[in-house]
Amino acid sequence: MTLRHHTITSKVYSCIRDCNYRNAIQILQSNLEDGAPRSRPVLSLLAYCSYHDEDYLQASEIYEELLEMCPSSEQYQLYYVQSLVNAESYIDASRAAASSTISPSSPFFQRMKLLQAQAEMEQGLLSEAVATLVQCNDEDIDTVLSLAAIHFRNKDYISALEQYNVAQTIDDRSIIAYYIALCRYHLEEYGVALRAVTDIIDTAAGDEYEGDSCLYFNLKAAILHAMKDVKAAKATMKEFMDMADEEDLLDAVTIHNDAIAKFGTDPA
């Protein structure tokens, strides 16, 4: 190893340690432009840094090049598909996942099939996504949530609710309880849904409000509107708008619902 190569490698790993992926990419690309060989170690670092810098398209292109060098590498197969999914290249992702040579006994198999199902779901290929998930561990939380998401997209709220209830036995995150309440809302079980989402909001209030809080308040307001209680819906949105004094806590849906609450008329 030359002194120059050692210096460049040291700089790159220093940037990675500091999560300064863009600088690491610039160093690696500059080195390649200076005539350095496109070796597997250099390309692996470049793909890794591109992915973590959220340049998923570039990462996928580099992982594709790495697969040409090492076609049997299960890690490169997985990272290639993962990059394509994050780049929203769903057709390419599903094709690459379907043609993967990763063995069912591999620790990467579950993740690959979940990515394939996600890519298929994003294309609206819901039956294909379900068939892919059948190959996954049915006790894995990601498998259960993926199945729930497919049923929800298919407007099969009863099946979605069943899967979210299973998920809640594995993971008690508030967001899962939210999706249970959302299914209840779509099934027009407004009383049950209202109690559930109110419990979620009350629990969140015991801690600091989290990033998903806008979802909870929006759902509560929507339920109250469905129940024709415009006054309570308006109070719910005001409570959240007063609490969310930072712009990044608000989204278009929240602002829209707040406007509905303000201009809605109380049927009573």
Image (tube, helix red, strand yellow):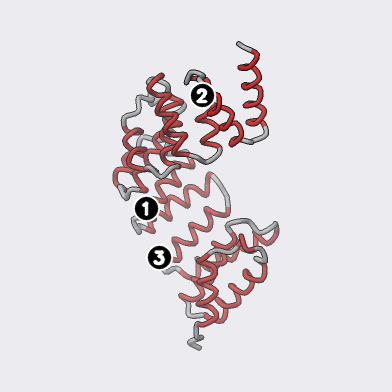
First in sequence, mark 3 or 2: give its number: 2
Residue drawn at 48 percent across, 87 percent down: 267
Q: Earlier in the sequence, mark 1 or mark 2?
A: 2
Disc 2 is placed on an element classified as: helix
Q: Residue furthest front?
A: 34
User: Would you place residue 185 above or below residue 83 in this image?
Assistant: below
Q: Note whether 66 is above or below 120 in the view shown.
A: above
Q: Position of residue 226 (x, y in %)?
A: 46, 75
The residues tagged by marks 1 and 3 sit, at their Cα atoms, a distance apart of 13 Å
Q: Please provide percent x and percent y for residue 145.
A: 45, 47
Q: Which residue is mark 2?
A: 32
User: Is residue 146 rendered to the left or right of residue 198?
Assistant: left
Residue 93 location (% of width, % of height):
36, 38
Q: What residue would you read off at disc 1? A: 151
Q: Which sits earlier in the primary sequence, circle 1 or circle 3?
A: 1
Observer-nearest of 30 and 57: 30
The type of residue carrying mark 3 is Leu
**Residue at 34% across, 38% down:** 92
Give the quarter of the image for residue 187.
bottom left
Closer to the camera in the image, 243 or 27: 27
The residue under label 3 is 187
**Comparing marks 1 and 3, which lies closer to the viewer?**
1
- Image quadrant assignment for residue 232: bottom right
Please state the horizontal and vertical placement of residue 230, each as a whole percent of the image.
52, 80
Q: Residue at x 45, y 28 (%)?
A: 108
- Amino acid bearing label 2: Leu
Q: Nearer the viewer, mark 3 or mark 2?
A: 2
Query: Label 2: few (<14), some or many (≥20) within 10 Å?
Result: some
User: Where 128 falls versus 29 (above or below)?
Assistant: below
Q: CA–CA distance between discs 1 and 2?
A: 47 Å
